[in-house]
Amino acid sequence: MDFNVKKLASDAGVFFTRAVQYTEEKLGQAEKTELDAHLENLIARADCTKNWTEKIFRQTEVLLQPNPSARIEEFFYEKLDKKLPTRTTNAELLGQYMQDAAKDFGPGTPYGSTLITVGEYQKRLGGAERELLQTSAINFLTPLRNFLEGDWKTISRERKLLENRRLDLDVCKARLKKAKLAEAKAAAAPDFQETRPRNYVLSASASAAEQELRLAQTEFDRQAEVTRLLLEGISSTHVNHLRCLQEFVEAQAAYYAQCHKHMQDLQKELSSANGDTFPNAFATNASASGVSAGHSPLATATLPGASSPSHPHNASNALGSGTLKIEEVKPPATGTRKAKVLYDYDAADTSELSLLADELITVYTVPGMDPDWLIGERGNQKGKVPVTYLELLS
């Protein structure tokens, strides 16, 4: 018990002297030992790595799981070292709702059967999303978390210890300086009654201060070397994080590729299933999904800031011009839509309609028409118009 009290008192004394030294340094009343430039650069690089790694980690969590409540739940399960229960993704939940609705509407109806099909593909999208979340958590988030909660805590602990060793070193330097000044002052104005004892005491005090300084310098150098080695390991951390980042990008690429394939398959399935009932419902989308290397007509038309597309091929049989004249074409009772013209277009012949950018026209299709073209009407004028020059509004 006596030993513990003495140790406590000793630790309190050390803490007090460090606090005094730190305060005097801030007030400019004490000298401070500066770290070498290389070590300062390593510390600055480590701080930068920690700060940006933390931001990237947090934002990646938000990207993969936008729901803050779900993130909090995952955090608690992780801290309690328990397995997180399987959570249904939003796409899977939507798909299930669609299929449940189809049962009430009637799976044999056009709407019901379409809901079943779309619901199934929504579930596939949800499964791809779940795979992305799992892969990203293992290959990207976990290494970043291990650095922040493991390596960085070790570096911070050693840096704090280095700062304490530096304060101890500067305290010893200050003590030695005071002892040297007192010894020099005593030598300049000796006390003739107690000259020898006082000089002996002052000399012994200076010698003790020199011994403490040598010990403090050794401890400081040793701790500086340990800290330097840890900080130089940041380069290895960057290499590891680079590999993890590449794996994260590969996981994202695989996810978006799966989503694109699922949606293409869904468009084709809906186009073939509903083509007879709704002739033009999916004609444009089906045409777009079949383009692998070129621009999608609708995608090109609706991209903001996109340049004017190349002039579409003049399909001579787009309306079956040999048997059907443009003036004989009548708009259907239903199925007309409004469209906004994206670019100026000059008609190639009398069967086409010239367009001005930003104007609104009425468009529709007729059986047997090329999916790259629509019939456009503006007042009493009528003619073929290219889909790529339009943004369909309704």
Image (cartoon, helix red, strand yellow):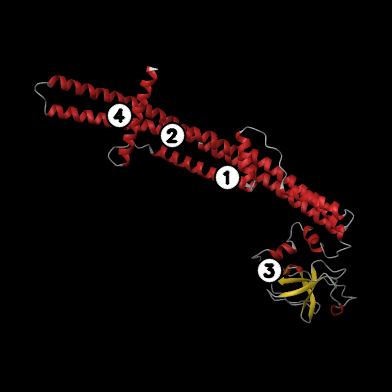
Separation of residues labelled 4 and 2 (CA atoms): 20 Å
Give the labeled residue for mark 4: 172
Q: Residue at x 71, y 71 (%)?
A: 340
Tell me residue 381's x, y (percent).
78, 80
Tell me residue 311's x, y (percent).
73, 70
- Callout 4 secondary element: helix
Residue 308, numbered circle: 3
Give the labeled residue for mark 1: 58
Q: Amino acid at mark 1?
A: Arg
- Callout 2 secondary element: helix
- Residue 345 higher or lower than 89, as above or below: below
Nearer the N terminus, badge 3 or badge 1? 1
Q: Amino acid at mark 2?
A: Arg
Nearer the N terminus, badge 3 or badge 4? 4
Q: Residue at x 26, y 22 (%)?
A: 208
Give the labeled residue for mark 2: 159
